[in-house]
Structures are given as structure tokens and as C-alpha cells.
Image: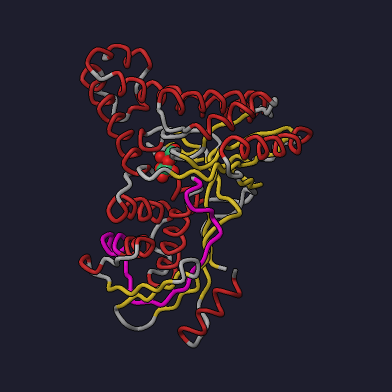
Amino acid sequence: MKAKIQEKFESLFGEEGILYASAGRINLIGEHTDYNGGYVFPGAINFGIMTAIKPNGTDKVKVYSLDFDQVSEFGLKEEDKPKEAWACYVFGVCRETIKRGGKVEGFNAVFAGDVPLGAGLSSSAALESTFAFAINDLFNDNKIEKFELAKIGQSTEHNYCGVKCGIMDQFASIFGKEGSLIRLNCKTGEYKYFPFHPKGYKLVLIDSCVKHELASSAYNKRRESCERAAAAIRKNHPEVEFLSDAKRLWLDEVRSEITEEDFLRAEYVIGEVQRVLDVCDALERDDYETVGEMMYQTHFGLSRLYEVSCEELDFLNKLARKMDVSGSRVMGGGFGGCTINLVKEELYDNFIKAAVEKFTQKFGHAPKVYDVVISDGARKL
Ligand code: GLA
């Protein structure tokens, strides 16, 4: 990828660019908890975005996507938003940096990536983090704090891409470290690295290759449900800033005041916040069977209470259970994408073979299988 990017950069701009990269992410557990002030437990992976970039001495950005074979040119003012959807991520990062008092000047860039799109692996966060990191290095002497870089990516999603996401994806792709998952408290910003080398197990993703069109609006609706539930609970318990602060009992108190749908969404979130902590305890004992069991519980919640799964993902989850896979669940925002599976090494080959065969038989297309490695996040190469 590196050689191709540099080659294109040289052919377009007649010189070499400076290389930066960042990564997509997995999340072991803690789904839809980030915007509720709860815990998440992600790690950066060996699929990412790479860019060659160089200041061009103007006030214009010229960026070329190798994967889309498209170029986009834009200025750095609010009214200069480009028309290409992919370029809005780069534009958003520039704007959000400027809004925070950071410096951004014109630059040329060529980028490419290998994060599968729509698989729930946060290709967009990888893109945002790559550019946020590069802009910080090139124009700001790395003075912008890493957490702020993640927020620049998150605000880009909110203000330029229409997704009211939490901080998890951008955090993971900025802070990711080889071999470690990171538990983040999304309310306080405290985080802790957990070395993750499950002996005797493999972590594998199975991509349903299903992508639902309305995923962003459905995502935003889930967030609104949670906010309504939190507001109802807050009337009785003013200390509840986020839904993650609420006790299950407090949710029951307001059951008649909120819709059944909002109740179910909140029920899932409150359970999930606790599951992350239980998983961390289990990891400290190397108890991967408990970790896996929690993953199944999360899947149940995401499917039945939060309703972000789909037929294809439920099928993969059920099959995993049937084949004694230790843990399996839909990962990321949902509405398509991947399941993440914790599989004993001796079961791995049979499970993958059966999953591919049976899924293809039922849905008429093959799923994709990704063996992920927990890797470094944003960096200069
Ligand atoms: C998407 C969002 C994240 C998070 C997950 C669900 O990936 O970008 O902020 O909410 O969904 O856990």
C-alpha cells in the first residue's frame, strides 16, 4: 500500500509525501455505551488507512482517494464543504481543528485503506484519525492532545457526516497499542491498557457483508431513546448525568413514563455497562469462558432489546453457540457488519468452514472472515 500511495503522490505532485497511518478497531465488549457515558473495551487492528501528505503553500487542500480513484479539492472555510462524501471526513477534520484554535494550511494528500467498508470496523474513524494526527504533526508541533484528536474525529462525524457517534472509534484508532485492548470510561476519559493474548483462543470476525442503508439515522434514534430514558430517571435522581449512571431499579421506577421501546433500549445499556466490568474481572483471571458468555449476553441484548442486529448476524451468532464457540456477538454500531467471535483454537477450522458453508447456503452470498491482530493506532511512518 505504501509504495502505491507514494507512487501516486509523486505522479500527481512531483515529490514524495510524508507518511501517516491509523487503524480501524474491534471492540471486545461495551457496545452503544460510549454516548451513554459508560465503558467500552476496544483495540486498534491491523486494517487501517495510510496517507502521504505535504503542505502545498496555498490555502487549498487537494486530496486523492486511491480506492475511489477520485480527487477532491476544497478550501478551509466552512462554506467550502466538498461534494464527495469521503472527502467530508478530511474536510471535517480540518474544520474541527481550526474551530479549536489549531492551525491548518493547504496540503496535498493521497490516501488508501484496507479497512472493509460497512463492516463495523470504523474505516471512517481510521480516516479521521490519520488526518487529525498528520495535521497535528505538520502544522501544530503536536501540541493538540491525543484525546482532543479523537474528539476532532468525533465532531467531524457529528457536524459533517450526520452521525451522532460516541468517542469509542476515534479513541481506539488514536490510542491503539499493539497487543492491548483499552478500557475507556467514556464519562471521565480515564483509560487502562489490558494486554490481550488469550492463550488457546482466537479472535475472529465474520463479516455478513450486509450494510443497511438507514444505519446512521437508526443509530441516531437509539441515542435519542437513551437520552429520553436518562432524562426521565434524572427527575427522580438528579445525579444521573448519563444513562450509565442509572441503576436498573431506577429505570423500573419510570417504566410507565417512557415508551416501551425507550425502556428496552435503556435496559440493554444499563446491563452492558456492567458487563464490561465483569469482562475485565474475568480477563484478570484469564477466564475466557466467562468473557465469551458475556459476549453472548451482549448479542442477546443488541438483538432483542436494542434491535441493531439482523437476520444474518443472528444466524452467525446462533451457529457459533451451536458449535460451542466460547463467545460471539454483533460488533460495532450494528445494522449489518460483523460478528466478533472468541473461539478455542481446536474448534477454529471447523467453525469457520461451517460458518462459510451454512451462511452461503442460506443467504446466497459468502461471508468474509478476518483474523484480526491488535495493533498500533495513529502514527507517523
Ligand atoms: C459506532 C459508533 C461508536 C459506538 C458504536 C457502538 O461504531 O461510532 O461511537 O457507539 O457504534 O458501540
Q: Quadrant of the N terminus?
A: bottom right
| Residue 286: quarter of image | top right
In this figure, which colouring scheme has been used for the structure? Answer: secondary structure
Residue 189 visible to an observer of this rendering: no
Q: In this orientation, which residue lies closer to the viewer: 70 or 107?
A: 70
Location of residue 88 in the rendering, given as x and y in whole percent from the top left corner: 33, 62
Q: Quarter of the picture for ligand 1?
A: top left
Q: Residue at x 32, y 15 (%)?
A: 250
Residue 42 in the image: above or below residue 70: above
Location of residue 133 in the rendering, given as x and y in whole percent from the top left corner: 45, 63
Q: Is residue 105 magenta?
A: yes
The reply, left or right, for residue 199 in relation to residue 342 is right
Location of residue 187 in the rendering, given as x and y in whole percent from the top left corner: 37, 36
- Which residue in the rendered view is the most extreme toward the right? 346
Q: Residue at x 51, y 27 (%)?
A: 298
Q: Is residue 26 magenta?
A: no
Residue 273 in the image: above or below residue 174: above
Location of residue 203 in the rendering, given as x and y in whole percent from the top left corner: 65, 39
Q: Quadrant of the C terminus?
A: bottom right
Q: Residue at x 30, y 59 (%)?
A: 96
The reply, left or right, for residue 272 in relation to residue 283 is left
The reply, left or right, for residue 29 in relation to residue 254 is right
The residue stretch that appears in magenta: 95-119
| Residue 201: quarter of image | top right
Residue 78 in the image: above or below residue 321: below
